[in-house]
Image (spheres, rainbow, N blue to C red):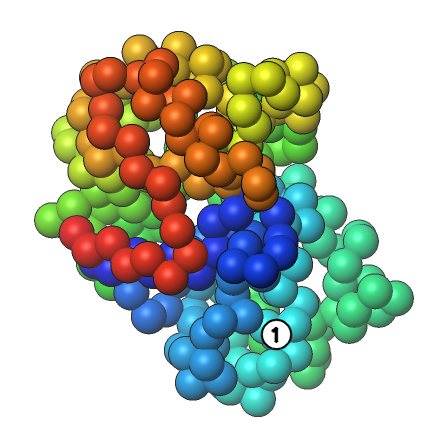
Amino acid sequence: MNIRILGCSGGIGLGNKTTSLLLDDSVLIDCGTGLGDLSLDELSKLQHVFITHSHLDHIALLPMLLDTVYDALVDRPLTLHCKQETYDVLAKNIFNWDVWPNFFELPSKETPVIIYESMQPGDCIEFGDKVVKMVEMNHAVPAAAYIINNGTGSIAFSGDSFTNDTFWHALNEEPRMDLVIVECGFANEDEDIGRDSKHYYPNALAEDLKKLNHRPELYISHLQPGKEEQIIKQLNSSISDFKIHRLSSGQIISL
């Protein structure tokens, strides 16, 4: 299984693209601005999209994706997987004919180019050699993490999150955990902002990592632009049981 990091920043600017991960050739996790780096041929191969939550930096290019590869999806619709609350936000505020056409009804309600399959925490979706499990997360809006197993490797992606037990408990229930991508959006100096917006800062993440029994490779995403090195330095000072890796756009991780 190859994980291609299309975007993983907490903001934009030269070299910074927001969250989107490509699993092999056909599965996306989130549709941030990093999705724009895929070619038209690569976009046309997508079959499944898993959305962690409804914030713009994680859904921004989903509308454009559907418009761009519309013809390819007429006979093979894209399947959207997310919490019901996330779908409701998309339907009400994005695909409402005012902001963007309702592709859940195009070319018709009976045969749309995108199909929604509701997931709730604990649900698993199986396709090919992959099993994707949804996990409840603690964020400012209803949010989810995903655990992906393919028989030979297991990874987890937190999406956006703050202090919780659900994610770490779910990881501990797995027989193995090779790689965990977890966000840390703010530096310790901004812990008030992190707490209010429900994003990790280094001291909070260090405390939560004590709950994890596995010792996977640990990659950090969603770093605040301009403070990336500061956050990574603080994480390295606070965490000794894990090797900290900074996630980067364009990076490919193989399991």
Residue 133 visible in the displayed image: no
Residue displayed at 58% across by 43% down:
225
Residue displayed at 52% across by 59% down:
15
75 or 213: nearer the viewer:
213
- Which quadrant holds the N terminus? bottom left
Q: What residue type is labelled 1?
A: Leu
Pointer 1: what residue? 66
Mark 1 surroundings: few (<14), some (14-19) or many (≥20) residues within 10 A: many
23 or 242: nearer the viewer:
242
Residue displayed at 54% across by 70% down:
36
| Residue that sits furthest to the right in the current view | 98
Image position, residue 118 (x, y; %) = 54, 48
32 versus 88 height, above or below: below
Image position, residue 185 (x, y; %) = 54, 32
201 versus 84 height, above or below: above
The image quadrant of residue 244 is: top left
| Residue that sits furthest to the bottom in the current view | 71
| Residue that sits furthest to the left in the current view | 152
